[in-house]
Amino acid sequence: MQLNEKIDVLTDSLKEYVDTNYELIKLQVIDHTSDIISAVIGILIVVVLSVLALLFGSLYVAYYLNDLIGIDNIGFAVVGGFYLLVAIIFHFNKKKLIENRVCNNFIKRKMAKTQKS
């Protein structure tokens, strides 16, 4: 084989390698994207159902407190104050309570997925 033929074979092999790598990267991006989208959809379903349960539970508690105390709308004020207190606690502790846990959970999922591959 002459040098020109070897260069042509090497060039073709290199093009094939680059094309294969490009396809592999595309498939990995699609895989990671689908993982993220499916996780987000699952979380959204749980959040929506939890919010609905919390809403109806809160309405029940508010009406129950109204009947228990005997003053109209005081139950709603108590439930609203409770949620305000919870919101303030979460606001001042959001890094520790939420952000760190979400980041750690995401990293664990990606590491587990990478180790399986």
Image: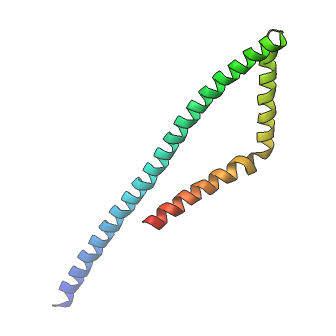
Is residue 71 toward the left or the right of residue 12 in the image?
right
Q: How many marks?
A: 0
Vertical side of 106 occupied by 45: above or below: above
Q: Quadrant of residue 82?
A: top right
Image coordinates of residue 26 in percent, x first then y, are 37, 58
| Residue at the far left in the pictured view | 1
Depth check: 111 or 8 in front?
111
Is residue 95 toward the left or the right of residue 36 in the image?
right
- Quarter placement of the N terminus: bottom left
Vertical side of 89 occupied by 63: above or below: above
Q: Quadrant of residue 72?
A: top right
Image coordinates of residue 83 in percent, x first then y, are 76, 29
- Quarter placement of the C terminus: bottom left
Depth check: 65 or 91 in front?
65
Residue drawn where x is 81% and y is 33% of the image? 85
| Residue at the far front in the pictured view | 68
Depth check: 7 or 117 in front?
117
Residue drawn where x is 80% and y is 14% of the image? 68
Which scheme is used to colour this image of the protein? rainbow
Depth check: 57 or 19 in front?
57
Image coordinates of residue 18 in percent, x first then y, are 33, 70
Vertical side of 72 occupied by 77: above or below: below
Is residue 5 toward the left or the right of residue 98 in the image?
left
Q: Quadrant of residue 76?
A: top right
Residue drawn where x is 46% and y is 45% of the image? 38
Residue drawn where x is 61% and y is 27% of the image? 53
